[in-house]
Image (spheres, helix red, strand yellow):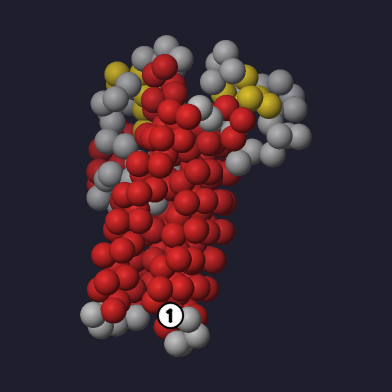
Amino acid sequence: MPKPKIYQWNDRAGRYKGPDGRFVSFGTVRGHLDEVLDGAERDMLVLSGVLQTGGTTIEEWQLGMRDSLKSIHLASGALPQGGWSHLSQSDYGRIGVRIKEQYKFLGRFAKQIEEGLPLDGRFFNRVKLYAQSGRATYHALEREEQAKRGKEEERNILGGRDHCVECVGQAKLGWVPIGTLILVGQRICKSNCRCHAEYR
């Protein structure tokens, strides 16, 4: 999340402000999330590499993945709300639903491994999707927060990587009523999406 010594949360606007007093762009804030998720991905891949070489059990791997998923989604939910101190019990509840959903998916994944799923490149690609799954949590709560604060329109801004056709189509729509765009994480590119939304 943005470092409190650098960014301050402006509760009236529902935005972060930098040391110069200007609002921090939605893209910059999303960039902080990407750093968190990319770090989590590295950790999950290391853990999964240990499983591949027989250095840990499937049960231990699953517990480690669960711990990472919990941290990922809590951070992803706190960021668009202004940080940990701004989370309400209701916010924790909404984030908790998403964490439980990921635990359910992970349980199925672990079961498939037990049944002989090869720990090859496809296995590691699936691990990466879990690490990046916090992006959908972030964007869902960000939209809710902005709508709550009276924002009426949103637009999709393409990220710096290759874009799926769905993301390009969403960006071409320009400014649309809030709630119109397909949320990041629910598009063809799933949690790999590097697009972000802007609100007004």
Is any part of residue 102 visible from this angle?
A: yes
In the picture of the structure, the residue carrying the numbered disc 1 is 57
Task: Give the residue at x 55% y 16%.
Answer: 13
Please identify the quarter of the rendering in which residue 94 is found.
top left
The residue that appears at 48% across and 29% down in the rendered structure is 89
Q: Is residue 173 above or below residue 62?
A: above
Q: Residue at x 23, y 80 (%)?
A: 115
Mark 1 neighbour class, 10 Å CA radius: few under 14, some 14 to 19, many 20 or more: few
Q: Residue 14, percent across and down?
A: 54, 20
- Expressed as whole percent of the image width and height from the top left, the position of residue 174 reads 33, 26
Residue 142 visible (yes or no): no
- Look at the image and tell me in which quarter the N terminus lies: top right
The x and y percentages for residue 52 are: 42, 83
Secondary element type, mark 1: loop
Q: Quadrant of residue 82?
A: top right
Instruction: Decide which of 96, 109 is in the foreground and name it.
Output: 96
Between 31 and 45, the one lying in front of the other is: 45
The three-letter amino acid code for the residue at tag 1 is Thr
For residue 177, side relative to residue 135 (left or right)? left
In which quarter of the view is residue 118 placed?
bottom left
Q: Residue furthest bottom?
A: 54
x 44%, y 24%: residue: 145
Mark count: 1
Quadrant of image for the C terminus:
top left
